Image: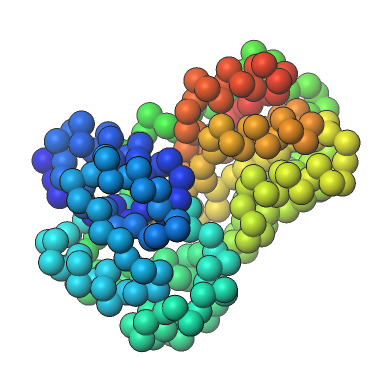
Amino acid sequence: MARIGLVAGEGKLPLVFSKVAKEKGDTVIAFGLKGVTSPDLEKYVDKLHWVPWGNLQKALLLLVTERIKKIIMLGKIKKDILFKDEDSLDKDAKKIMDKIKDKKDYAVLNAVNGVLSKFGVEVLDSTTYLKDLIPSRGVLTSRKPTKEETDDINYGKEVAKKLSGFDIGQTIVVKDKTVIAIEALEGTDETIARSGKFVNGGFVAVKVARPDQDMRFDVPLVGIDTVKVLASVGGKALALEADKTLLLDREEVIKFADGKDISIIII
């Protein structure tokens, strides 16, 4: 049994983790952001603290008060909040942001990790409790990718791997070996949706991890919403990197994809 702190962003993943951790007998103390973290999380954890965005001082005080020595970070926090809500940062958070050279995910997260380590808090691999959500290599759906789709997937993976090293482009949309859209701040679903403005369906979406992916931070995640967006704009295949991607609601995802004649492949 362990006492785990959960820094929870948006989406279902923090809830899934909390359920698994509780089943193992662990105590989960969660820290959520109002307007970001799902209020439903309160049903799955032993205690939920709401922390205003940018209030690092309060967050650290709560970690100490709750005797948290290990934390897991799960759930998306949209990166544009760093630009839109700079004025909400307290003096401790501003001090961190002033020290780093850029606002790339790893720069920010590693700076936060450095502060946490000074308080004796270890950030755990975010997949520690979620290994069952990482699919093995192979085709998950009834329909396999066509030769043309496979060629586009291979090309997309090559491009995405190169770009992701710059902290962009983890999701690439390709048709006829032409890049239609590249993920920037907006996220996977928005990138795929944007593709529908440029081509009349028939494309593939490829999602990869960074070359130096740190499994403590921002692990690639796909769920039913992503596949629904893909279907809505005529996408025909979704490729995910093996051993580095979390797949939520697997059975629902596969059933929906089969119904839309979409191929999902783990590469």
Choose between 81 and 125: the one closer to the eye. 81
Apparent side of residue 206 relative to residue 149 in the rendered image (left or right) = left
User: Where's residue 254, x and y in %?
Assistant: 57, 21
Q: Residue at x 43, y 40 (%)?
A: 12
Apparent side of residue 109 relative to residue 18 in the rendered image (left or right) = right
Q: Residue at x 40, y 74 (%)?
A: 54
Choose between 42 and 63: the one closer to the eye. 42
Apparent side of residue 142 relative to residue 79 in the rendered image (left or right) = right
User: Where's residue 67, x and y in %?
Assistant: 12, 61
Q: Residue at x 14, y 61 (%)?
A: 66
Q: How is the image coloured?
A: rainbow
On screen, residue 106 above or below 214: below
Which quarter of the figure is the C terminus placed in?
top right
User: Where's residue 120, x and y in %?
Assistant: 18, 67
Which quarter of the figure is the N terminus placed in?
top left
On screen, residue 92 above or below 234: below
